[in-house]
Image: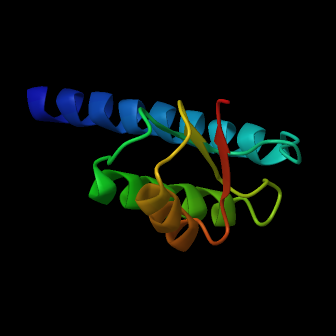
């Protein structure tokens, strides 16, 4: 008896969560995202945690591709002017990304 009650509660919880997930997907799919871009902020102008930045760019590209071309390319934001070595690495990494820095 108690097992069936627990099972019924679990089924109801999963049903509510499933409906919520479907509604979220439908609402997100219907939103206009033509002028939206994913930004990655790189603090400082020196050497950064390169693996984390490369992973962030990869994730941003996947999210952008998941929106079927509705979004602009990912943007890398720098707080200062990059050094020459960092600028070369960012240029190699950000082939499809835009790079902005504060002057």
Please state the horizontal and vertical placement of residue 100, each as a whole percent of the image.
67, 43
Is residue 69 found left or right of 8 in the rendered image? right
Instruction: Kindly indicate the quadrant of the structure image that contains residue 64.
Output: bottom right
Q: Is residue 1 at least partly visible in the picture?
A: no
Q: Position of residue 50 (x, y in %)?
A: 32, 56
- The x and y percentages for residue 68 are 76, 66
Residue under the point 22% across and 27% down: 5
Q: Can you see residue 32? A: yes
83 or 44, which lies in front?
Answer: 83
Residue plotted at (77% across, 48% down): 29
Residue 75: percent from the left, percent from the top?
Answer: 65, 48
Left or right? Give the position of 34 relative to 1: right
User: Dividing the image into 4 quarters, which one contains the N terminus?
Assistant: top left
Residue 35 lies, with reference to residue 12, above or below; the image says below
Q: Quadrant of the C terminus?
A: top right
Where is residue 95, by image quadrant? bottom right
The one of 99 and 53 positioned closer to us in this rendering: 99
**Residue in the image at 83% along x and 57% along y:** 70
Q: Quadrant of residue 54?
A: bottom left
């Amino acid at each position: 008896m108690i097992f069936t009650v627990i099972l019924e509660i679990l089924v109801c919880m999963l049903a509510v969560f499933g409906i919520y997930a479907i509604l979220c997907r439908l609402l997100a799919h219907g939103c206009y995202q033509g002028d939206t871009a994913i930004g990655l902020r790189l603090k400082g102008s020196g050497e950064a945690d390169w693996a984390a930045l490369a992973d962030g760019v990869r994730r941003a590209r996947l999210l952008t591709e998941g929106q079927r071309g509705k979004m602009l390319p990912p943007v890398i934001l720098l707080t200062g002017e990059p050094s020459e070595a960092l600028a070369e690495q960012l240029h190699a990494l950000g082939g499809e990304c835009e790079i902005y820095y504060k002057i």
